[in-house]
Amino acid sequence: MAVVSEYTDTLLPIRWPDERRSSYDVVIVGGGGHGLSTAYHLATRQGITNVAVLEADYIASGNTGRNTTIIRANYGIPEAIRFYQHSLEMYQRLEDETGAAILHQTKGIVWLAHTEMAMRTERARCLMNTANGAQTFMRTPAELKELIPELDLTGGGRYPVLGGSHHVEGATARHDRVAWAYASGASQRGVDIFQHTPVTGLLRDGDRVVGVETADGPFAAGTVLSAVGGRVTEMTAHAGVRLPVRTHPLHAFVTNDYAQGFSPIVASTELMCYVSQTERGQMLIGAEFDAQPSYSRQSSFAALRSYSYKITRLLPFLRDLRILRTWAGICDISADFSPILGFTGVDGFLVTTGWGTWGFKAIPAGGEAMAELIATGRPPALIAPFALDRFRRDHVLADQGSAGTR
Ligand SMILES: Cc1cc2nc3c(=O)[nH]c(=O)nc-3n(C[C@H](O)[C@H](O)[C@H](O)COP(=O)(O)OP(=O)(O)OC[C@H]3O[C@@H](n4cnc5c(N)ncnc54)[C@H](O)[C@@H]3O)c2cc1C
């Protein structure tokens, strides 16, 4: 069995700059997965290395280091399936590309259905997925029981399992390692990453954004990208831009080890709860986000109680485990439950946002596409549908049923 240092040895160091340059081609606000992946892809794919990433706290301290690490492409609309499938495939190659052990594991993910309506939705999902390149297949209750022997097909007598969809390439990866892999890869190529540097305002020259303000002074920039996760409406307010985004907390928790091993990721779209096993053997459980918008990262007993109730109906063995640790992150939920990527209507100021409770899986493809957009000024086809102006054009990408958290 491998020891921990074998994994950490694969993480290359980050070069922390002593001082800032007089100006940058690109300043990225937010050192989460999306900001760091964009910086990495600017350096590796576009040859742009005069880039600064400004992080208010430490890198991956936001949702990138708080999520439940599920990677999947079983979305409900063609635009999203194609985008997330590309990202899922980039994850499969990420260890080879960066040399960093991100502990990527393909496990498959099962979405259980408890009613005829949910069965119809999952059948439609399978057809839509396979037509757009993602591998998702219907499973009978008997097939599910074979895949997940611990599953109670009666759902505790309340939520009978009628069947489910099985997205066979569903995976997990260590979230902080993904952030570190992109950060070290970017910094080795010349990108400056500043931690503990909150951006407090935007510098303007007429109608154009030309940099950012921080407590340590201004950073001049040709382009500013906001990649601030749940803080996006504060950031865009500096530019006078209002986004169709609300901010909601999402909670998760882990139990002590389950020695038997538990392979697939299991979710119920109707009960809004999901579970996977970490590399350490702990059971990692999440559910729907808080209905009340807020910036609170306080864990709540009500959330724990409701998540535990639902998940133990399906997997009774969880009742014998203990909750070890719980936490929350603040999520930027867009009006149509799809991301918002690209231009804001203010020159020099772009956003990558609306990643909500589902943006970890999008980190490779989101960063790659944003880097291309910044370098060329043209949105790549993969993200063109996710532009902010879709709301004005009435071309919303409604896909709430694929979020898995509402
Ligand atoms: C409990 C939970 C479970 C989740 N599970 C999954 C999952 O299983 N699969 C999945 O795909 N997604 C999941 N997500 C969603 C996913 O974590 C996020 O969508 C993703 O991490 C967003 O990445 P980001 O880089 O946009 O934001 P973040 O990782 O939040 O990074 C934004 C960064 O910006 C910084 N920042 C904010 N304001 C400023 C400022 N003014 N100046 C400088 N820096 C600033 C923050 O400190 C932060 O580090 C989950 C989220 C949560 C909370």
Image: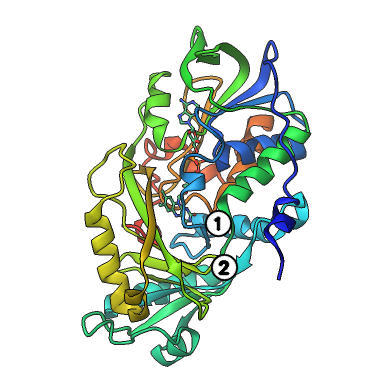
**Relative horizontal placement of residue 312, taking residue 142 as reference (left or right):** left
Vertical placement of 357 versus 40: above or below?
below
- What residue is drawn where x is 59% and y is 67%? 133
Tag 2: amino acid: Ala
- Tell which of 22 and 79 is nearer to you: 22
Per the image, the residue denoted by label 2 is 134
Tell me: 186 left or right of 136: right
Q: Secondary structure at mark 2?
A: loop
Residue drawn at point x = 39 percent, y = 89 percent? 141
The quadrant of the image that shows the C terminus is bottom left
Q: Position of residue 45 (x, y in %)?
A: 75, 40
Residue 178 rendering spot, x and y as whole percentages? 62, 49
- Tell me where residue 335 appears, x and y as whole percent: 33, 44
In percent of the image, x 37 and y 35: which residue is there?
Answer: 392
Splitting the image into 4 quarters, where does residue 274 fall? bottom left
Q: Which mark is residue 397?
A: none
Label 2 Cα crowd, 10 Å radius (few <14 / some 14-19 / many 20+): many
- Above or below residue 51? Residue 368 is below
Amino acid type of the residue tagged 1 in the rendering: Tyr
Q: Residues within 10 Å of mark 1 (few under 14, many from 20)?
A: many
Give the labeled residue for mark 1: 84
